[in-house]
Image: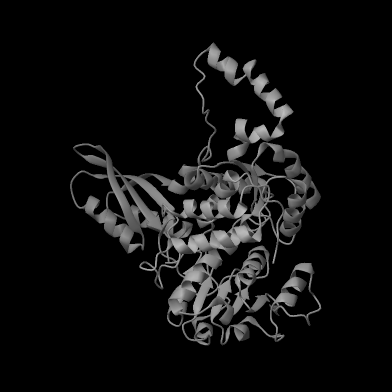
Amino acid sequence: MATVPSVSYSITVRLEVPAGGKAVSQLTHAVENAGGVVTALDVTNAGHEKLRIDVTCAARDTDHAQAIVDRLGEVEDVVIHKVSDRTFLMHLGGKIEMKSKVPLRNRDELSMAYTPGVARVSMAIARNPEDARRLTIKRNSVAVVTDGSAVLGLGNIGPAAALPVMEGKAALFKRFAGIDAWPICLDTQDADQIVEIVRAISPGFGGINLEDISAPRCFEIERRLRELVDIPVFHDDQHGTAIVVLAALTNALRVVKKELPDVRITLAGAGAAGTAVLRLLLAAGARNVIVCDYLGAVHQGRDDLDESLRWIAEHTNAEGYSEDLRGAVKGADVFIGVSAPGILTGDDIATMNSDAVVFALANPEPEVSPDDAREHAAVVATGRSDYPNQINNVLAFPGVFRGLLDAQADGVTQEMLLAAARALAAVVSPEELGPNYIVPSVFHPDVAGAVAAAVRESAGGKARGFTEA
């Protein structure tokens, strides 16, 4: 699927042109003729004969960025000095840092913040461990834990390559919920070792956010950790996705005037995200769901079912449909994809029920072209930022953890997830609701607060364990 220029492929080209003549005006035309978008043009040094100019522009990908540079180089009398990738510049030296909240200007302040004064605080916590939430960063800290086995859409790229993503996650926690999050990238993909490491470091945190750990190990790791630690454990790839999908679907069905228990849903993807989405949909009242993986529909007659797929087969597809995804989409009211790019066409969407809802969430390339889907569906959502209705986990996890930390919860319940989804859906007012606005912007000022309040109220103080549908 062809993409449009994006700021994620933004470059700044430093070049030199003659002070007179047409070269300056030709720069913008050169970028546009190459299919790029100029976002800034700054003169950084001016002389009587030469101008030094920084041209900032957005491209579709790295090859397109190089094509833009080549086109700029073809402008008469232009000399290119330097090309900077703005995304890489943002990541130089990392994106987060630790800062002291207290001044350390003299010996008195040092003596209270550290030895000998800190010993009194340590002994108070030793006598009453619950004071750790009141007297340390534990009350506002989350560990973002990964093994690098399923990073974004990049696959098993390892813990070091996962660190920029975990830094980004930590930055989002701080920006949207005021939470101090710490990237923990583990150089092991052994489930036993991951469980033991996280258990051992848990006293220093108020919550654990598991991130980018491949299925099916992520299910086992999350389940075992919930039994071992006394703080909430939340796998965002599962539950964050599920919350936002349910919130978006709630509003999409309001747009097309259908009810969740009455619609037929086809779900593509039976991994971590797909399974969590399914569980939350069923808990919210969905009754007619068919789940498909790369082998086709999941049904009880298949002989390749592991524990997770067996659960799916037992709770969905009551009629025992056994064919492929395209057949499962025919006559469906809702399609939700958390799977692979380009597995459906616009013609497939045309076979769905009238006023269909399509969530094609594979990223960056969705299961079906959004433009093609819009020709036949009433509401379309993607995981992309360049289309309306972006299903983005940042709508959920900051508020969820803010609520959990504020409630001093030691677990997560299904009711908390449902409460979060309901609160997120309600941020979109009836006056705003429409086919192109079923979820609020990630920068909407009410999102994190509304989700946090709902989770905090659902927690009712301390909540223990995790109750699944």
Q: How is the image coloured?
A: one colour
Q: Nearer the viewer, residue 119 or 213?
A: 119
User: Where residue 341 sits in the image (x, y, percent)?
Assistant: 57, 71
**Height in image: 64 above or below 314?**
above
Q: Residue 200, located in which quarter of the rendered image?
A: top right
Q: Quadrant of the C terminus?
A: bottom right
Q: Quadrant of residue 280?
A: bottom right
Out of 250 and 65, give the one closest to the viewer. 250
Q: Relative to 459, is 172 on the left or the right?
A: left
Report if residue 274 is visible in the image: yes
Q: Position of residue 400 (x, y in %)?
A: 57, 52
Residue at image location 46% in from the left, 59% down from the top: 61
Image position of 194 with respect to 466: above or below: above
In the image, residue 320 lies at what x, y percent? 72, 85
Residue drawn at x 78%, y 73% as measured from the top left:
305
Can I make out residue 384 in this image?
no
Residue 74's place in the image compared with 103, above or below, is: below
**Which residue is depicted at the point 51% across and 41% down?**
95
Residue 96 position within the rendered picture, expressed as x and y whole percent measured from the top left: 52, 39
In this view, the residue in front, 440 or 343, is: 440
Residue at the top extreme of this rendering: 107
How many numbered circles are shown? 0
Left or right, residue 243 beside residue 193: left
